[in-house]
Amino acid sequence: MSTEQGKHKAELLDGALLADEIKLEVSGQIAEMRQRYGTVPTLAAVQVGDDPASEVYVRNKIRACEAVGIRSEHHALAAVTSTSELLALVQSLNTREEIDGILVQLPLPSQIDESAVIEAVDPAKDVDGFHPINVGRLAMGHPGLVPCTPAGIIELLDRYQVQISGANACVVGRSQIVGRPVAQLLLQRDATVTICHSKTRDLPGVTRQADILIVAIGRAGFVGREHIKPGATLIDVGMNRLSAEDDVRRFFGSEAERRLQVLEKRGYTLIGDVNPAEAIEVAGRFSPVPGGVGLLTVAMLMRNTLKAAQLRRALDQ
Ligand code: GUN
């Protein structure tokens, strides 16, 4: 914490630094695997359609594989792909011995039965941790493959020595990808966990009790001063696009000019679910967007792919 011109400034939690550390660690272990066993893990990334955000995410995942030494395959299917066509691809990836991890980028086009696809992935290759078997293992506190963003959030809290045990932790959002699994992980680490959602009464009254506040709801800049306990640790998991100049000015205060330039160049600028200017004034520690947990998701995917390979092939860990 520091004070500048009388205004409190939260310590920023640097996801990029931690993501680099994790990837370095994974690449060392992969080099060792190659040396000892003459093999490296393989990840199959499946993308359906041309959603621009998914395209960026999948590209980043493939690049990270190259950086750490994981072999990767990119399966890009047309937007009109049917559930049965996608299930056939997943089945073939399940049966191919050299494939260690299967990642189906979400969201899928509306004609596809997403649950059927998630349940078709071999739980041993489910590097996203979305299969009901892995969700159940997590709920029971048993070892398994854990969803990447939630696992990254715990790593970030640990790295910055945020005490989880005994803390009041509040998760805003109950998605399968972030809200629910991160609540399970916090519970496993002995936090007192509250999960909030769109029907929660007096949301600010509940979130202001939180020592650790995690927000994953997909609403641009929604969480502001009134939601945050002074000194709390605040993790923003949202990833929203702002395309109106007024919104950019409203949310970004002194950073607005730079953001307006980004807007002009790209047509949008990224913002999380938290109002960053207000968060910095009230929170004790803040993981912002971009630069926070997004990069950790990819790093944890690399770690999960290595872990899946080690477990499947019964290699020393
Ligand atoms: N869409 C948004 N986040 C994720 C993720 O972690 N994994 C996959 N497969 N799709 C996503």
Image (spheres, rainbow, N blue to C red):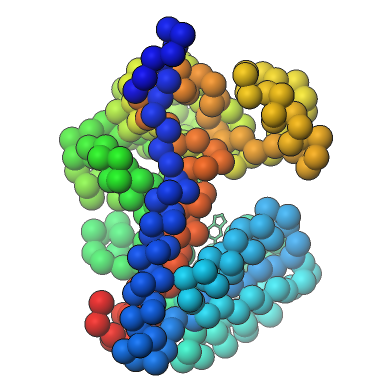
Q: Position of residue 231 (x, y in %)?
A: 33, 21
Residue 259 in sight from this viewpoint: yes
Res 38 → quadrant? bottom left
Query: Percent from the top left, x then y, of residue 72?
Result: 56, 78
Q: For the image shown, how many numbered marks are present on the structure?
A: 0
Depth check, front residue: 205 or 245: 245
Q: Residue at x 62, y 72 (%)?
A: 46
Residue 131 position, x and y percent, is 44, 67
Depth order, front residue of 217/242: 242
Q: Horizontally, is 209 left or right of 69 in the view?
A: left
User: Would you say 246 lies left or right of 171 here?
Assistant: right
Q: Measuring 55% from the left and 72% from the top, which residue is drawn there?
A: 66
Q: Quadrant of the N terminus?
A: top left
Whether residue 59 sits left or right of residue 20 in the image: it is right
Most extreme residue toward the top is: 6
Q: Residue at x 57, y 88 (%)?
A: 92
Percent from the top left, x then y, of residue 290?
56, 41
Q: Is residue 3 above or below residue 176?
A: above
Quadrant in which ligand 1 is drawn: bottom right
Judged left or right of residue 305, residue 142 is left
- Return the residue nearer the eye: 214 or 89: 214
**Quadrant occupied by the C terminus:** bottom left
Residue 245 drawn above or below residue 308: above
